[in-house]
Each structure stands twice: as C-alpha cells, then as structure tokens.
Image (spheres, helix red, strand yellow):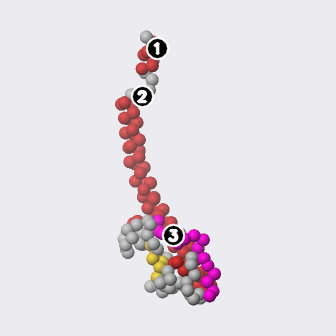
C-alpha cells in the first residue's frame, strides 16, 4: 500500500503546470516588446550598411568608367556590363544586388538630387517618408 501512494505522488499536477505556463507567458510579455523594437533598429542598420557597400561599388564603377551608372542602367550595371562600356572591370559586387531588409528594391537615381547619385530604401512601408521603421534610409546622410 505504501508503494501505491509513492507512485501517485510522482509528476506535476495540472495546477502546477498552469502556474508555470502563466509565469512563462508573463515573462515573455515583458521581454518580447523590447526584443522586437531592437529588431526594427537592426533592420535599419543593415539597410544603412548595404547602402554604404553599394555606394562603394558605385565609386569603383566611376573610377573605371569615368561616370556613375545612369538611372536607366541602375544598380545592375554593378553586376553586368552595360552596352558600350569598354573600361568596365566588374562585376563590382561579389553577389546579386540585395533587396533591403524589408524585401524592397533599393532606389537609385543618377544624377541625384542630393549628390552625384541618390541611393535609398523607403523602409518597412516601401513608401517615401515615414517615421520609425517606416523612415527612409538614404546615402546622403
């Protein structure tokens, strides 16, 4: 009889499991907002770093060809030789042109309104302007 009582006392009760689940849920609700706010800032930092890498590749293109790619040639001129360029020494990027961290294409204009070229990401919303994670990330700032 003593053996049967010991066996029935092993394990957790349903109440104990529910309390543990509730505690884990409360902790997650406190930690998750801080984690996800960092995720948005990280994406913005990645976009800025990618823009800087693309700008460096554009500078290399200019050094070889005496000009930046036109808006019509776009960033693809960093990977594939545009027609008529004899001094093209690319590809100027080791991999394909990346999309921004939100899956949108980077916007490239040459000549630019803020310099020789403008290179930007419209952020999470993919639209000009915005605040926070929707803000534009640009090459001229």
- All told, the count of numbered labels is 3
Residue 12 is marked as: 2
| Majority SS type along the magenta span | loop
Q: Which residues are magenta?
A: 86-101
Q: Is residue 128 above or below residue 111?
A: above
Instruction: Name the residue rendered at 42%, 58% in the picture.
Output: 37
Instruction: Give the mark nearer the N terminus: 2 vs 3.
Output: 2
Whether label 2 touches label 3, CB < 8 Å: no
Residue 3 is marked as: 1
Disc 2 is placed on an element classified as loop
Instruction: Give the mark nearer the N terminus: 1 vs 3.
Output: 1
Q: Residues within 10 Å of mark 2 (few under 14, many from 20)?
A: few
Instruction: Name the residue rendered at 45%, 23% in the picture.
Output: 10
Instruction: Find residue 40 and report its horizontal and vertical position in percent.
Output: 44, 61
Instruction: Find residue 21 and report its horizontal and vertical position in percent.
Output: 39, 38
Instruction: Name the residue rendered at 61%, 83% in the picture.
Output: 88
Q: Farthest front residue?
A: 83
Q: Nearer the viewer, residue 89 or 3?
A: 89
Can you tell which of label 2 and label 3 is closer to the viewer? 3
Residue 14: which quarter of the image? Answer: top left
- Name the residue beneath numbered marker 3: 98
Can you tell which of label 1 and label 3 is closer to the viewer? 3
Disc 1 is placed on an element classified as helix
- Judged left or right of residue 68, residue 20 is left
Whether label 1 touches label 2, CB < 8 Å: no
Let me know if residue 27 is in the magenta part: no
Instruction: Find residue 18 and report its horizontal and vertical position in percent.
Output: 37, 35
Q: Residues within 10 Å of mark 1 (few under 14, many from 20)?
A: few
How far, Cα to Cα, is label 1 from label 2? 18 Å
Q: Residues within 10 Å of mark 3 (few under 14, many from 20)?
A: some
């Amino acid at each position: 009889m003593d053996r049967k009582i010991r066996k029935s006392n092993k394990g957790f009760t349903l109440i104990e499991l529910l309390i543990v689940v509730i505690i884990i849920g409360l902790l997650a609700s406190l930690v998750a907002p801080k984690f996800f706010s960092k995720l948005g800032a990280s994406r913005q930092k990645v976009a800025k770093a990618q823009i800087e890498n693309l700008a460096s590749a554009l500078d290399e293109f200019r050094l070889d060809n005496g000009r930046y790619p036109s808006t019509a040639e776009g960033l693809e001129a960093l990977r594939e030789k545009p027609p008529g360029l004899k001094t093209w020494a690319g590809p100027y990027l080791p991999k394909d042109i990346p999309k921004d961290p939100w899956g949108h294409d980077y916007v490239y204009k040459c000549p630019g309104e803020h310099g020789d070229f403008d290179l930007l990401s419209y952020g999470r919303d993919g639209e000009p302007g915005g605040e926070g994670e929707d803000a534009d990330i640009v090459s001229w700032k």
